[in-house]
Image (cartoon, rainbow, N blue to C red):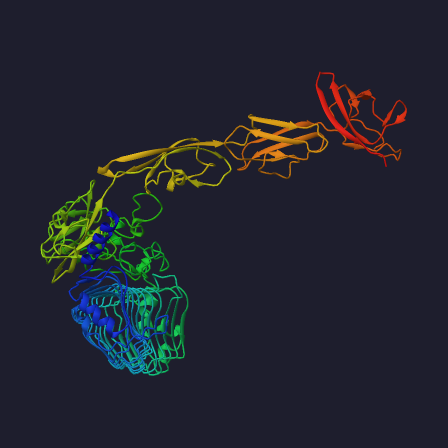
Amino acid sequence: MKKAIFLLLLSLWFSRYYSQCPPPGTVTLASQTDVNEFAANYGTCNVITGDVIILSGFVQDNSEVFSEITDLTPLNFLKNVNGNLKITANINELIGFNNLIQVRGDLEITNCKFLKSISGFNKLQFAHDVVIALNPVLERVEGFKEIETITFSLKIGFGDQLKEVSGFENLKIIKEELNISENPFLTKVPSFNNLIEIVDDLNFTSNPSLNLIDGFNELISIGNDLNIEATKVISGFNKLERIGNYFDLRGLGMEEIPSFNNLEEVGAGFRIANTDIKSINGFNKLLKVGNINFLEDWFILSNNSKLNQVTGFGSFIFVDGNLEVKNNILLQNCSWLCNIINNGEITKDLIIQNNLGDCLTAAKIIEICDPDFDDDGVADVIDFDDDNDGILDTVEGNGITDSDNDGFPDSKDLDSDNDGCFDVIEAGFEDQNSDGILGDLPNNVDINGLITNEATGYTTPTDKNNNGIFDFQEASNTDPGSNGLVQLCLNSPIKDLFTVLNGNPDRGGSWVPSLASGSGEFNPLKDKPGVYTYIHSDPTCGQRSAQVLVDIPSTLTAGEDTEVVFCNQITQVDLFNFIEGNPSKGGYWAPQLESTTNIFNPQRDLNTEYTYTVIDDFCGEISSKITVKNITKPNAGIGTKIQVCEYVPSFSLFDLLEGNPDANGTWFPSLPNGIFDPSLNVSGNYSYTIDNGACGSETSIVEVEVLTNSSLNNVSIKVNDFSSKNNSIQVLVFSDREYEYSIDGFNYQIENIFNQIKGGEQTVYIRGVDGCEYYTETVFVKSYPGFFTPNNDGSNDVWRLKDFPDVNYTIYIYNRYGKLIKEFKSSSGFWDGTYQGKNVQSSNYYFKVVTETGEVLHGNFSLLRK
């Protein structure tokens, strides 16, 4: 009766708990009826905890086809989906979802056979992955006006009729790739002018009707590839600084590209090929191509049949691989390559082919790139000091040595080790105006290009640590990096300001003003916003510094992640009061508490982890987590005692504990994961401890004895013999361990009794099943013949003892009436089946053996006459 009442109450409780939101798990809507009923039942629910799958035309096992979904507007109430939202519905128009704020999983709109347009999603701020693909008649995608962060990818593709994509105006970060490809009729794409970072690829490929890509004006970094194919006009990309892998523009029909004048680095290959571009002007900050990834790196400008002018590339100094300019049949001037040829490095081949004029061959380009690096009127080919830093070119490596691998040889580098301190100072010479050139202006030089009006210079440079490397070629001055900016919310994670510095800062500097952490870690809840200065000091080159501006534009906070532990069963608590970090009021809980307030009741609220979220205009959704743990008494299980062989494989001591112990305890002495290895670990007591903090701890002990391979000394062998039919040997080992036994040393058995044993000496072998412990003993099994046939055929004509120990004995043979028939000694006697010279009849006969030690044995045998 009590059980029935309990089940009834439990049922009512579940009904009440889930009345506002669906149960945890996947929600599948397979018909219009499903959509309407879901909206009717859960239309007030703010948070869907699992996946929402909209699958039109679903077929059940009984082949019943659900009704087609024609209207999704009843789902406009949805605000938060903590799982995936996947839509495959045979609708003509997908509108609405304008109350949806976030999708913690993937948002997929795929395989919608009749879908022609998508609009809405205009409050969506966050999604993990957005995929719009394989919708064969889709023509237009609009909306998505507020989404700022996609933590995986945005993919729009394989749209056979897709003509226009708009929206996404506020998208700032894509944590993986942006891929708009395989759309044959696409003519318009968003500008993406608020997008700052793409962590993986940016792909626009196989969109043959796309004539314009205009935007990406805030984009700073592409983590992997920039890949654009056959788009007529590309503009924008004004702030792009870094491409982690390939820069690849290609395809006939491409006529115009941006200057990319802020692009500094391409991690792998750079290619502009097979285009209709007429001129290229830009790339003036591009330094290096192929210096990040160990790939098939190259710089390729090829097969651009209309290209007649290239200008820019003024800072270009490094290509890790081939540099190829070929098959540009109208290109005559390649002076844009002079900087990398004179001052940089190409690790493989310079390939110049099938162009015109000065671009005809590599030799032609080198011929027009004869510089005077220091502009002192003396050509570098005869100048003894190409950079006028007071250090002879012969000391600086004559154009071969490049100490900092920046593409400029030391002989043309005023800071050869790139430590922020000019070579002239580190060499011990004077530079009064701090311009990196020996002495002060004017710089008069002689016929060899050496400055003549200074007292210092052109002597052996300083090597203070006497390690054979001149100080100007060995970085000795630490680099503070360059200024950085970071915006944080009050509940942002602790931020190491060192990571905000730009450039390549060295650690070990100091921060002014000091932070609460005593280091460079900024805690928004403890440190004030403002300017923090990072300082390095050097006795030779003085103090260098960089600054970080920390901006906290909002005072709203959701507090800090908190864990609350209760050692005893609780009734209810106000979770808000337990959040650390002074959270702001007015947020909401996910999942929603049954009380619809901050009150947590363990009898009604089943989850133990809750997210408290405050919505802020700047920081968006600010969240913290609170974990409620109701800890019971720790259980370390029941210990035991075991013996193990030194040869057995490793095993878990935890598995030996009885009493259902709690997992994740600690072992002492330390055993990683509780694994005992007899070849490494020694015998002893190993304690397992469960520590529940404030709720106490408990320990159990496993006593382990590691056995070595040694002879047993606790063995007893019992021989049951002197039988003509079944002699046996029984082996007794006084131990709880498992052993196996043999009497031939080859074939072993678990049974400790051997039957049907032949007479004579027998050797008993014992060994541990696990490979440890052994024993060998030889015993004698006494036996006698069970019959004989005295017919003078030469076989079994007489009866005597066989397989008997070598002792003296007397045998007495009796007939079945007890009459003594024969008596003889062991040394010579036998019986031939006669009595007083006459053959006795076939029958059973009995005998007695009396040994010299007094042992008396009895038996019987048969006399058979044939």
Can the viewer see residue 429?
Answer: no
Does residue 808 sit above or below 150 in this rendering?
A: above
Q: Is residue 194 left or right of residue 338?
A: left
Can the viewer see residue 445?
Answer: yes
Residue pictured at 27% horizontal, 79% vertical: 115
Does residue 332 sit above or below 663 in this rendering?
A: below
Residue pictured at 17% horizontal, 56% vertical: 623
Q: Quadrant of residue 802?
A: top right
Residue 76: image location, x then y, percent:
17, 71
Residue pictured at 17% horizontal, 63% vertical: 45
Give whichever of 3, 112 is nearer the camera: 3
Give whichever of 98, 167 is nearer the camera: 98
Does residue 388 sit above or below 133 in this rendering?
A: above
Residue 105: image location, x then y, percent:
26, 63
Q: Is residue 740 left or right of residue 809?
A: left
Q: Quadrant of residue 137?
A: bottom left
